[in-house]
Amino acid sequence: MNKSIPLSLTAAAASRPSTFGRLRLLSYLLPCVVLGLALATSWYFWERERREIEDVLQGEFEARVRETTSLFRERMLAYEQALRATHGLFATSDNVQRGDFQSFVSNLRIQNHPGLQGMGFALIVPPTERERHIAAVRSQGFPAYTVQPPGDAGASTSALYFEPTGSTLLSTLGTDYFSEPSRRPAMEAARDSAGIAISNKVKLPEEDAALVQAGYRMYLPVYKNGKPHGTVAERRANIAGWIYAAFSMDGLMDNILGERANITVEVYDGGSDGQGDQLIDTYSDRVGGESAVKLFYTTQQVEVGGYGWTLTARSLPNFTTAIAISKLQLVARLGVAASVMLALLSWILLRRRMRALSVAENLRTAKEHAEAASHAKSQFLAVASHDLRQPIQAISLFVATLQAMAKRTELSGAEVGYIAQRLQLALNGLGRLLNGLFDLSRLDSGTVEVVRRPVEVAGLLAELGNAFAGPAGAKGLGFKVRAPHGLWVDTDPLVLARVLSNLAANALRYTDEGRILIACRPRGGALEFQVFDTGIGIADEERARIFGEFYQVPNVARDREHGLGLGLAIVSRSVQLLGGQINVRSTLGKGSVFTVTLPRAAEPEAPATSPADLDDHFTGSVLVVDDDPELRESMQRLLAAWGYPVRVAATLQEAVEAAGAQADTLALVLTDYHLGGNVTGIQVVEAVERRLARQVSAVMITGDTSAEPIAEAARNGLRLVYKPVEPRVLAALMKSIQ
């Protein structure tokens, strides 16, 4: 007997057009249209004013950038001039003494050049002159002087002079700068070109580790007086040393923007924005807030001494003047106020008529809901009556059959057993129907108590997998559960388990070949539980009716072997009770996907387990082997908190090395069954025991519920536990190890 299920009550009421509905739509639409047109007009005037302000600010920004770039170039050229002036000292004397260098640099007044920290001279010391040179410098009052690094077979360079004199000189005296990778390319370039070259970024000798800033060296070669240096070969042969200028980028850029900190400048070396090393983040105060005027941006290339720099300038929100912002705000506020007033007026004009129609519409809707509910109840009772009468009728006929058989002189045991079996099936069907109706009644009446708490997803899905893996395998279906670790759902575990069990049972019932997948994934602040199958699928026109009572898509004949048609109705009401949503996607003949969305929960704090609870049975260190870094870290922290020495490893090789490091104290190996590279926990335990030449207690932890790890563990005499392992279970397990 074919039964049809009525559509939802609200769908019936919404199927007919309503005058009140159209007017209500108009009451929202018309004010919105008025508001939109008024705001568009206001925006036009506001945008025109903004463009005029931006044109003025663009010119001011470009002028500020040109001024900053010019000042940067001037300061760098000042460094170069100081360097060339010092070079003149060496060009006029074959033997520049320390006092001569000190006096000359003092007269340069380098303190007037922002960022220039000092001038220095690095001398090339041939191997044959090393000892004589060291003795001469020591005689000048530097008894600890030496040429660093000592023992070099070739020529070395020595930082001989640096002015102004101070701690910097003492820390750098004798340093072989030519051996440092950050300075050598610049020194070679200066030597071969007979010009200025700038080093890569270096750490300044006078700064501490907590205040590292960008420092650079500008080098100029000094050749032996009277010796030719017209070619590269002659320059390399006759080089005597280098004079250099030490400068910091912070000092160079100090106060370069003036008093108005409304633009920011980023400096890059290498002459290409983003391709060289960034010298410093920004040279300005981070002031100002959101600006209605666009922020300006430009890039300038600067070349000094053959070295390229890139200056990137950006305007800050406070670059826009307060007067300009006030003008824009005034235009915006007047426009918005006028727009809102016009929209409010249009809404008030429609309000009175809506009130008159609202009462009539509500009364008609209530009447339609009552009629639809009465119709749905009648159909529900009709279908329930039909499904209740069928098993009762069968029971009645089987009882009559037994009564007739009782009159025989001889009874066949097989016949009686068959009748008893059919009676039991009829009673089971009747019991399932009554239980389903009782569950629906409790859900509809609100008597089902929901106790929501954080529930770990992995454990919930693992139990579901254990329950359905066997029946799926017996039917020849692929069955897989993806149980991600670290996910917690805010739900009642009993209600959710029943929901997922019903969905899994439906998937198993209507899938004859292929596979079933149960999985969970995060979606924003929620979790999606999904049941995939490759079963018969659901037609589009049937999808809206599958959550009705006693409805089964392929079972119009009401065959109870295919269920009673109450499962999805219970699922739908249970999900609503949990505060979630359920959706279905399906293709006829290919399969279905049911998705239950529930709120995500934060992982609760694990109950503290005192190591004293473990008694004194277990002593020694622990080796944890797992290729999942998160699991390794969490296990290591837990065991360490309990007071046990613990080492971790990700591979078999690391496990053997870690075991060797704790050979005398290693008492327990906790290993995952499946490791990377087709390595199993069995192989890890065997390798560790070979390394230690003794047996070690071991426990395998796995999320694989197949028969293989069970058989392997039993064959090797190892303990096997399943993920997720609760701390109290792990504590009890360690307590049992002697």
Image (cartoon, rainbow, N blue to C red):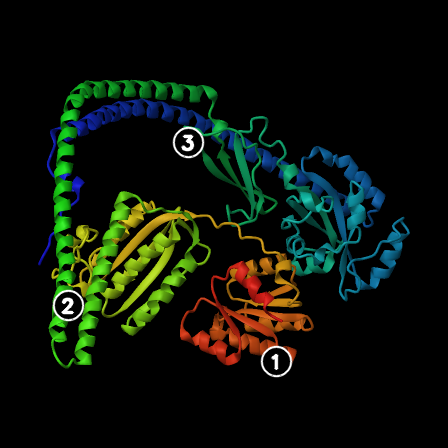
Q: How many marks?
A: 3
- Foreground mark, 2 or 3? 2
Taking the image as shown, residue 72 lies to the left or right of residue 326, namely right
Give neighbour class at mark 1: few <14, some 14-19, many 20+ (Cα, 10 Å): few
Where does residue 122 sit, x and y in percent of width and height?
A: 75, 51
Q: Nearer the viewer, residue 625 or 35?
A: 625
Which residue matches tag 1? Answer: 690
First in sequence: mark 2 vs mark 3: 3
Which residue matches tag 2? Answer: 399
- The C terminus lies in which quarter of the figure? bottom right
Between the residue at mark 1 and the residue at mark 3, the CA separation in whole angstroms equals 71 Å
Disc on res. 222 = none
Q: Nearer the viewer, residue 387 or 466?
A: 387
Give neighbour class at mark 3: few <14, some 14-19, many 20+ (Cα, 10 Å): some
- Foreground mark, 1 or 3? 1
Three-letter residue code for mark 2: Val
- Do we see residue 5 in this rendering? no
- Do we see residue 323 in this rendering? yes
Q: Secondary structure at mark 3?
A: loop
Disc on res. 294 = 3
Give neighbour class at mark 2: few <14, some 14-19, many 20+ (Cα, 10 Å): some
Three-letter residue code for mark 1: Arg
Taking the image as shown, residue 236 lies to the left or right of residue 126, namely left
Where does residue 49 sit, x and y in percent of width and height?
A: 36, 22
Between the residue at mark 2 and the residue at mark 1, the CA separation in whole angstroms equals 71 Å
First in sequence: mark 1 vs mark 3: 3
